[in-house]
Image: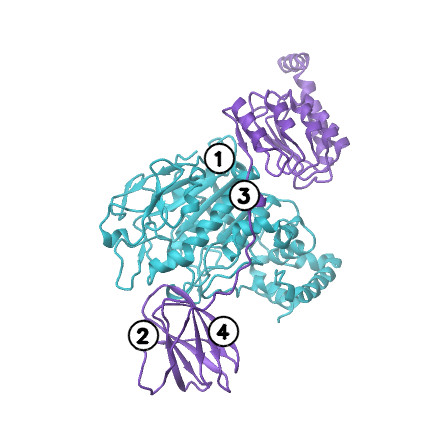
């Protein structure tokens, strides 16, 4: 009997109906591809996402979504919605976070957000909005974060909003027109390493010493392939590869490194010792 | 080349012991009351393999004697009173997004065990890399609590596994959680490779998830093979978790588009830098954007090979290597990464965790290098509800031990779990013997 009384009391204050409405609305959202999660920290509040699984959501579908009045967070990134659809959101009085990035939304849609007094986070990057949209958002007193990268918002428009709303974090992002794509050029040799023929008068040190990073281009002018060994810091031989007859090899190394050239049967032919400059090393005929 | 079907079959043969495993239904997932109100939706781990020097990154010691201070100076950051190494000039401007922890320490002087303790938050148990008695990696554990859409992997790691002198190291797999939770390894398809020994001999990469133009034909054949498999539902179900995921990725999930870096704005690609480090971080962002909950990026060559090549194990030639090869890539690509996440409004929902093996020794050795030093080192967080512009803990004047806020890799993990809305003290049972394991025995740092 007590329980019955409680139930009727619940029904009388409308909570019961509200919950029943929610479950129908939630089912509809799920059917449309949306993900519905409980919003942490508040009773009977929801987080609704379309950006990963429901990207074909259109304006008509948005009317159905907005039937769930207790949405606290709504993610519509990458969906097919337009400004016209945003009129359905005007009644979501508990909305705190709204993702509209990378949709066709423009200034005409922003007017519908002007009364979302709880809104704290609004993402509009990659939309068609201009400074006019920012003016419409000035009145949202709870707005703390606003994202407008890759829109038509100007520096002047952004500064104006910043002045009007000093506590707001307005993120404009980087200006891509200022990024220059540089094609990496091959490093130009500034030095030519001396060939120290095996058995000749000048011989390299017994081991490499640590130095600074450089590159060396080995060119094989012999009439046969050669093997390339680095002599490590302990004097050991470390094979780096073979250079075909007439071919060249760009090698990363350090200054004060010893490189040994042998024939394919490992018979030493000669060596190079690197300097601090990017160099060319010609293996003579 | 081993054909895909062959390699899959051989895997199935070797994994029969694991095939029957399912996680018990009493594995209860969701967050506890101790979790913060809002939780991060995804996590990206950035790992500097080899052990990044704390002196030449986040904890310079300008007042220490020259033999400890080293060759580099220090610079101001956007955080008043906080200095970075002078060769992180771009990142210094983003310190407002970073929470630096300068007082981490552990007891493991070798790379393998140090990586294991940083990756799993627990001491090594002696298992080989894929041994199911190991502790799961942070990526595996966090991914366990996510259920992404079909065709979207729970966790992806790139571009290599971690090797030391040819041996793959333990700590990057799901251990006792089971192979279902092993992060999927992919190779970053662009950027100048890390110099040094880069191993990608894992079976997984036989699948050639590579968009290299020269491989297009090969790939088309592969797709054909997978299509055939798909037509046969039973055979498809037989495919192991990894192959199935890889197949889904190749056959039209949003993750496949994310993997194709050619689809990214060339200016954004340039912003990250034409290096595998930068392109890996770019790919991490794209994967998270496509709904992958956990991504792990190795920001280094894969095999330490005694410190040769582009890894952070700088026993020799420390200063030129840091200045010319390692810090520029780190500085440039991490700065671009944080900028990009921020301007898309993704940073506060994406937890970024920077991990490394250990710090480097105070005294510069005879080869101009610094050796392994687990007594104190620096790690960092960004995004995911963690407050930027702060430094937690400190090391002493010479950078030899923690001075304030001494903490462990387990505490770093507990912090990550908290940001992700996961109760770090939760007990899970291993699916083989049903033994209970508490995820993490650390305590979250007050960084929120």
Classify 10 Å Cα crowding around label 2: few (below 14), some (14-19), many (20 and above).
Answer: some
Task: Tell me if residue B27 can be seen.
Answer: no
Q: How is the image coloured?
A: by chain
Which image quarter: residue A271?
Answer: bottom left
Badge 2 is on which residue?
A207
Q: Which mark is residue B385?
A: 1
Disc 1 vs disc 4: which is toward the camera? 4
- Is disc 4 placed on a helix, strand or loop? strand
Say whether residue B330 is left or right of residue B214: left
Disc 1 vs disc 3: which is toward the camera? 3
Alpha carbon distance from label 1 to label 3: 17 Å
> Above or below — where is A183 with respect to A13?
below
- Is disc 3 placed on a helix, strand or loop? helix
Alpha carbon distance from label 1 to label 4: 49 Å
Badge 4 is on which residue?
A249
Chain letter belonging to callout 2: A
Q: Is there one chain holding both mark 2 and mark 1?
A: no
Q: Measured from the top left, where is residue A172 in percent x and y? A: 56, 36
Q: Which chain is purple?
A: A
Chain letter belonging to callout 4: A
Disc 3 vs disc 4: which is toward the camera? 4
Task: Tell me if residue A248 can be seen.
Answer: yes
Q: Colour of chain B?
A: cyan
Q: Measured from the top left, where is residue A247 in percent x and y? A: 52, 78
Badge 3 is on which residue?
B340
Which image quarter: residue A120?
Answer: top right
């Amino acid at each position: 009997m007590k329980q019955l009384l409680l139930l009727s009391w619940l029904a009388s204050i409308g909570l019961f109906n509200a919950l029943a409405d929610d479950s129908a609305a939630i089912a509809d959202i799920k059917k449309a591809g949306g993900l519905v999660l409980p919003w942490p920290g508040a009773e009977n509040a929801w987080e609704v996402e379309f950006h990963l699984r429901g990207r074909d959501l259109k304006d008509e579908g948005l009317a159905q979504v907005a039937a769930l009045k207790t949405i606290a967070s709504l993610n519509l990134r990458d969906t097919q919605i337009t400004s016209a659809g945003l009129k359905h959101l005007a009644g979501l009085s508990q909305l705190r976070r709204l993702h509209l990035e990378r949709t066709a939304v423009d200034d005409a849609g922003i007017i519908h957000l002007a009364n979302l007094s709880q809104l704290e986070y609004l993402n509009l990057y990659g939309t068609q909005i201009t400074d006019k949209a920012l003016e419409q958002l000035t009145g949202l007193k709870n707005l703390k974060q606003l994202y407008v990268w890759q829109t038509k918002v100007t520096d002047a428009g952004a500064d104006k909003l910043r002045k009007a709303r000093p506590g707001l974090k307005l993120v404009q992002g980087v200006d891509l027109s200022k990024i220059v794509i540089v094609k990496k050029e091959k490093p130009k040799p500034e030095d030519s390493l001396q060939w120290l023929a095996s058995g000749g008068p000048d011989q390299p040190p017994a081991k490499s010493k640590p130095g600074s990073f450089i590159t060396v281009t080995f060119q094989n002018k012999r009439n046969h392939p050669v093997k390339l060994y680095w002599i490590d810091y302990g004097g050991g031989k470390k094979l780096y590869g073979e250079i075909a007859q007439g071919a060249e090899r760009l090698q990363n190394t350090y200054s004060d490194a010893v490189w040994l050239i042998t024939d394919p049967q490992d018979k030493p032919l000669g060596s190079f010792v690197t300097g601090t400059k990017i160099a060319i090393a010609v293996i003579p005929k | 080349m081993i054909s895909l079907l062959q390699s899959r079959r051989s895997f199935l043969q070797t994994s029969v012991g694991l095939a029957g495993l399912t996680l018990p239904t009493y594995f209860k997932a969701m967050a506890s009351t101790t979790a913060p109100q809002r939780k991060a939706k995804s996590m990206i781990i950035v790992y500097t393999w080899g052990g990044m020097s704390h002196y030449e990154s986040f904890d310079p010691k300008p007042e220490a004697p020259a033999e400890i201070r080293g060759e580099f100076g220090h610079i101001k950051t956007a955080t008043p009173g906080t200095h970075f190494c002078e060769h992180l000039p771009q990142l210094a401007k983003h310190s407002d997004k970073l929470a630096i922890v300068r007082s981490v320490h552990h007891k493991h002087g070798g790379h393998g065990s140090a990586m294991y303790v940083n990756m799993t938050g627990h001491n090594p148990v002696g298992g080989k890399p894929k041994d199911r008695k190991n502790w799961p990696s942070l990526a595996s554990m966090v991914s366990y609590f996510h259920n992404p859409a079909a065709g979207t992997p729970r966790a992806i790691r790139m571009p290599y596994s971690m090797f030391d002198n040819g041996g793959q190291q333990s700590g990057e797999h799901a251990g006792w959680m089971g192979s279902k939770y092993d992060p999927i390894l992919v190779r970053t398809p662009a950027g100048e490779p890390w110099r040094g020994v880069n191993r990608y001999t894992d079976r997984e990469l036989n699948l050639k998830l590579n968009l290299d133009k020269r491989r297009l034909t090969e790939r088309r054949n592969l797709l054909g093979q997978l299509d055939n498999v798909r037509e046969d539902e039973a055979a498809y179900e037989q495919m192991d978790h990894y192959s199935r995921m890889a197949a889904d990725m190749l056959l039209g999930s949003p993750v496949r588009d994310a993997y194709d870096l050619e689809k990214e704005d060339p200016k954004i690609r340039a912003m990250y830098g034409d290096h595998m480090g930068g392109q890996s971080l770019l790919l991490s962002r794209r994967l998270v954007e496509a709904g992958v909950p956990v991504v792990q990026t190795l920001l280094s060559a894969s095999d330490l090979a005694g410190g040769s090549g582009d890894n952070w194990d700088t026993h020799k030639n420390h200063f030129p290597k840091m200045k010319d090869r390692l810090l520029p890539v780190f500085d440039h690509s991490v700065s671009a990464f944080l900028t990009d996440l921020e301007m898309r409004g993704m940073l506060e929902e994406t937890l970024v965790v920077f991990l490394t093996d250990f710090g480097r020794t105070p005294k510069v050795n005879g080869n101009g290098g610094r050796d392994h030093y687990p007594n104190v080192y620096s790690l960092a967080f960004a995004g995911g509800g963690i407050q930027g512009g702060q430094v937690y803990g400190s090391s002493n004047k010479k950078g030899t031990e923690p001075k304030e806020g001494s903490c462990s890799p387990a505490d770093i993990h507990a912090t990550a779990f908290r940001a992700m809305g996961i109760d770090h003290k939760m007990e899970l049972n291993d699916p083989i013997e049903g033994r209970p394991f508490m995820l993490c025995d650390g305590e979250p740092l007050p960084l929120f």
